[in-house]
Every structure is written in C-alpha cells, then in structure tokens.
C-alpha cells in the first residue's frame, strides 16, 4: 500500500486523487502511508480534504499544511456540507462540520443555521438514532447558547435514551467542560449500562480536576 500511495501521488489525475484519499482514510494510523500521502497533498488537496472532512480523520494535519489554496478548498467543502440533501442532513455531514469547528471554533458563527437545525433533529424522537447522535456533536459551540445546550445534553443521560445518543451527550459535555461535570455524569451512574459506565470513567479521567 505504501508503494501504491507513492505511485498515486505522482499522478495528477482526479482518479488517482480519489484512490489516494481512500488509502489515507483506511491507513490513517500508519505514519509511512500518511507521509506518502501528504507528500503529494499539493496535487490532490481537494480530494484529500473532502475525504478528511467526511471521515473525520487527519483534518488537523491537513490544516497544518496551510496555504491559501488549502483554506479555500476546505471552506468550499464546508459550505457544501452545510447544505442538506434532498433527504435532509446525514450523520456524516454533521460529524464533519463538528470536526471542522473543533479546529476552527470561530466557524460556529457562520454555521448557526446548521447548529439550530441540529437542535431540532435532537429534539425529534422520530429521527434516526445515528442522526440524533451526530447532531449532538454540534451542541455547546455557541457562547450565547451554552447554558441551554448543557441543559439539553443533561436530559439525555436518562435510562430511556438510546446508548449511542447518551454516549454522544457525554462526549459533548466533556468538550464543554465545567466544574459540575463530574456530579452531573455520576448522578445517573446506577442506571448506566456497563459500556456507558466505562465511557463516563474514561471521560472523567481525562482531567485531574475531575477526579478530585
């Protein structure tokens, strides 16, 4: 696969760029594959950026490559992701936008409509669970809505909530932080499933002040 990455990187064809992007996603943890892919990023940046945003991998590394072309490409991709398809937003779109805000917090102001839509999706009990879980990743991004979003997330720690949504809520609450987080998360401890308890413990152990 390393040889394939080097060979694809030497080609300027769009097909080679797409194949290279697939390799990047599949072998994101392989430092040698990453090095081979990034060595030709200036040729295939658009395809790599799209795959990175859609799969939530190596985005920070691509951003570090810098340059006006990379920023313009990423901005264009984010703009496309912010538009729902004929069947509405898909989980991958919302997760990718959340990843983008992780690296560019100021982008939340330009994505206010999408974030508002994410709140509506989360409140819709008939929406698919994966979509609602993905929507949670966009909450807690705007200072003016922070307190309200924290209250929303807390309500998803109850036994009736599907585990996928509950775990996503824990992750978003950890990102927002706050000294009350340990008490909030541990309040529902008796009713958590084993995998939920494990995730809560892992979350609290991330920061020393949450374990004191």
Image: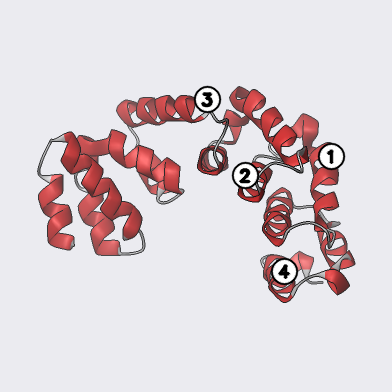
Q: Quadrant of residue 198?
A: bottom right
Mark 3 neighbour density, 10 Å: few (under 14) some (14–19) many (20 or more): few
Q: Dot 1 lies on which element?
A: helix
**Residue tagged by mark 1?**
147
Q: Which mark is residue 68?
A: none
What residue sits 41% from the left and 29% below the top? 77
Residue hosting label 2: 131
Residue 150, relative to residue 211: is it above or below? above
Label 2 neighbourhood size at 10 Å, few (<14), some (14-19), many (20+)? many
At mark 3, the secondary structure is loop
Q: Which sits earlier in the primary sequence, circle 2 or circle 1?
A: 2
Could you give the CA–CA distance between mark 3 and mark 2, rounded to whole angstroms? Answer: 15 Å
Q: Kindly report the distance in space between the C-alpha atoms of the residues bearing marks 4 and 3.
A: 33 Å
* Looking at the image, residue 192 lies above or below residue 89: below
Q: Give the residue at mark 4.
A: 196
Q: Are marks 4 and 2 in contact (CB under 8 Å)?
A: no
Q: Is residue 187 left or right of residue 143?
A: right
Of mark 3 and mark 1, the one earlier in the sequence is: 3
Residue identified by numbered label 3:
83
Give the number of the mark in front: 3 or 1.
3
**Circle nearer the viewer, 2 or 1:** 2
Circle nearer the N terminus (1, 4):
1
- Give the label, 1 or 4, closer to the camera: 4
CA–CA distance between discs 1 and 4? 24 Å
Image quadrant where one finds the N terminus: bottom left
Task: Tell me residue 2's x, y (percent).
Answer: 17, 61
Sooner in the amino-acid sequence: mark 3 or mark 2: 3
106 vs 155, nearest the viewer: 155
């Amino acid at each position: 696969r390393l040889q394939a990455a080097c060979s694809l990187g030497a080609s300027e064809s769009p097909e080679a760029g797409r194949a290279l992007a697939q390799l990047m996603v599949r072998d994101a943890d392989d430092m040698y594959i990453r090095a081979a892919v990034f060595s030709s990023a200036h040729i295939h940046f658009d395809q790599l950026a799209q795959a990175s945003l859609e799969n939530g991998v190596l985005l920070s590394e691509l951003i570090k490559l810098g340059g006006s072309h990379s920023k313009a490409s990423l901005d264009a991709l984010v703009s496309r992701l912010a538009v729902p398809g004929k069947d509405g937003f898909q989980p991958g779109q919302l997760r990718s936008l959340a990843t983008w805000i992780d690296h560019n917090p100021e982008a939340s102001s330009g994505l206010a409509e999408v974030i508002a839509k994410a709140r509506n999706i989360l409140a819709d009990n008939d929406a698919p669970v994966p979509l609602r879980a993905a929507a949670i990743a966009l909450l807690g991004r705007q200072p003016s809505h922070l307190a309200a979003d924290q209250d929303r997330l807390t309500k998803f720690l109850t036994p009736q909530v599907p585990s996928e949504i509950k775990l996503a809520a824990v992750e978003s609450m950890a990102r927002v932080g706050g000294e009350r987080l340990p008490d909030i998360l541990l309040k529902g401890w008796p009713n958590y499933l084993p995998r939920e308890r494990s995730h809560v413990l892992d979350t609290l152990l991330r920061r020393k002040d949450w374990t004191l």
